[in-house]
Image: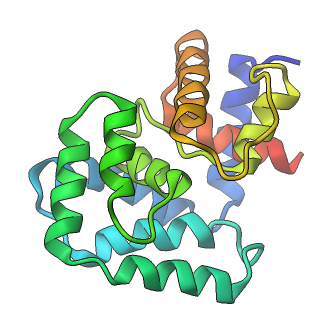
Amino acid sequence: MTLSRSIVATKADEYREQEPLFPVEQEAVETLPGAFESGEFGWRDAEWIVQWYYRRFLGAVPSAERREREARFGRNEFDDVRDAVTDVAAASDPADRIDRLLALEGVDVPVASAFLLFADPDACIVVGEREWTVLFDRGSLADPFPDPPSVDAYEAYLETCRSATARLECDAWTLYRALWRLWKS
């Protein structure tokens, strides 16, 4: 079954009503794009994205693994993080954006995609097994989730999502919320 506008709207609304992290995510979607573009953000803003990527699973990622990945990101110099994030906010090519973020310790393609979501929530979407699987199960992606996803796999996923957002007349943040809830259905 393909995604319809009504399914996406319903599931995105369901996300807003039922997911405990929605209020802080929505605030980040509203404030971080401008902060990243101007470079006017702090360490905790960047650190929050890494934490959010793993903690959005509400315990499904083992604590030791999550803490190790967060600690690896914490070893970066803030100037390096700020430079990478402001470069990402200014760039338009997804591969360039991902590559710039991959230079940071503790950032892989999925975490980089989280930075892209919060840098450009209209056009970029986070990648994870849940979101990918919903699209795969509906025939939008040809292959199951590649663990870990490569830059090329993310680009194919992003293109699929951008086609869906154009067809469904929604932004990537809305599509993400719908995919997350569809996985739970």
Query: Where does the N terminus fall, quadrant-wise?
Result: top right
Q: Position of residue 25 (x, y in %)?
A: 47, 59
23 relative to 134 in the view: left or right = left
Which quadrant of the figure has residue 183?
top right
Determine the residue positioned at 69% across, 29% down.
Answer: 8
67 relative to 97 in the view: left or right = right
Q: Position of residue 7 (x, y in %)?
A: 76, 26
Q: Is residue 12 above or below residue 20?
A: above
Q: Residue furthest top?
A: 167
- How many numbered circles does the render carry? 0
Determine the residue positioned at 52% across, 68% down.
Answer: 52
| Image color mode | rainbow
Q: Is residue 36 above or below residue 165?
A: below
Q: Nearer the viewer, residue 114 or 178?
A: 114
Determine the residue positioned at 66% across, 89% down.
Answer: 64
Q: Position of residue 27 (x, y in %)?
A: 38, 59
Which quadrant of the figure has residue 140?
top right
Which quadrant of the figure has residue 62?
bottom right
Q: Is residue 164 above or below residue 122?
A: above
Query: Where does the C terminus fall, quadrant-wise?
Result: top right
Determine the residue positioned at 71% across, 59% down.
Answer: 18
